[in-house]
Amino acid sequence: MINHQSSTAQLYIEALKRLLGSNPDEQRK
C-alpha cells in the first residue's frame, strides 16, 4: 500500500509542476 501511495504522490507532484509551469505562461499572456 505504501508503494502505491508513493506512486500517486509522484504523479501529483508532476501534475503540480506542469500546472506551475503553465501558470507563468498564461500569466505572461
Image: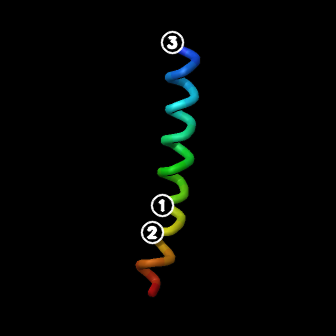
Q: Residues within 10 Å of mark 2 (few under 14, many from 20)?
A: few
Count up the numbered dots. Answer: 3
Q: CA distance from mark 1 to mark 2?
A: 5 Å
* As drawn, 26 above or below 13: below
Residue 28's x, y, as percent?
A: 46, 83
Residue shown at 51% from the left, 50% from the top: 15
The residue positioned farthest toward the bottom in the image shown: 29
**Residue at (49%, 41%) from the top-left corner?**
12
Q: Disc 1 vs disc 2: Cβ atoms closer than 8 Å?
A: yes
> From mark 3 to mark 2, how far is it between C-alphas?
33 Å
Q: Kindly identify which residue carries mark 3.
A: 1
Query: How did the renderer colour the structure?
Result: rainbow
The quarter of the picture where residue 29 lies is bottom left
Q: Please, which residue is most extreme toward the top here? A: 1
Q: Residue at x 52, y 14 (%)?
A: 2
The amino acid type found where label 3 is placed reads Met
Q: Kindly identify which numbered label has been placed on residue 23.
A: 2
* Disc 2 residue type (three-letter): Asn
